[in-house]
Amino acid sequence: MTLPTAIMWSHRSAKIWDHISIVDATQSLGILLRDQGTLNEAEQMFRWALAGYEKALGPEQL
């Protein structure tokens, strides 16, 4: 299982987003994918990271 696939699979588990370090790692993966030119995958990671930050911190904090 590739790392993006593992992140996609784990995204389905709501409890994982309670850990801000997982959200940070998802954002970092998005940056890496963007730098490698895989923009569709990077966008998905950024969207998941944003959703995770909203869930963990609340939308008012962003």
Image (cartoon, rainbow, N blue to C red):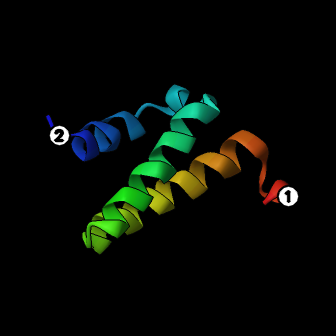
Three-letter residue code for mark 1: Glu
Q: Residue at x 46, y 46 (%)?
A: 26
Observer-nearest residue: 53 or 35?
35
Q: Are marks 1 and 2 in contact (CB under 8 Å)?
A: no
Q: Residue at x 51, y 33 (%)?
A: 14
Q: Position of residue 49 (x, y in %)?
A: 53, 52
Quadrant hosting residue 23: top right
Circle 1 SS class: helix
Up-down relation of residue 41 to residue 2 (above or below): below
Q: Residue at x 25, y 69 (%)?
A: 38
Up-down relation of residue 40 to residue 22 (above or below): below
Q: What label does residue 2 carry, if any?
A: 2
Three-letter residue code for mark 2: Thr
Mark 2 crowdedness (10 Å alpha carbons): few <14, some 14-19, many ≥20: few
Quadrant hosting residue 3: top left
Q: What label does residue 60 carry, if any?
A: 1
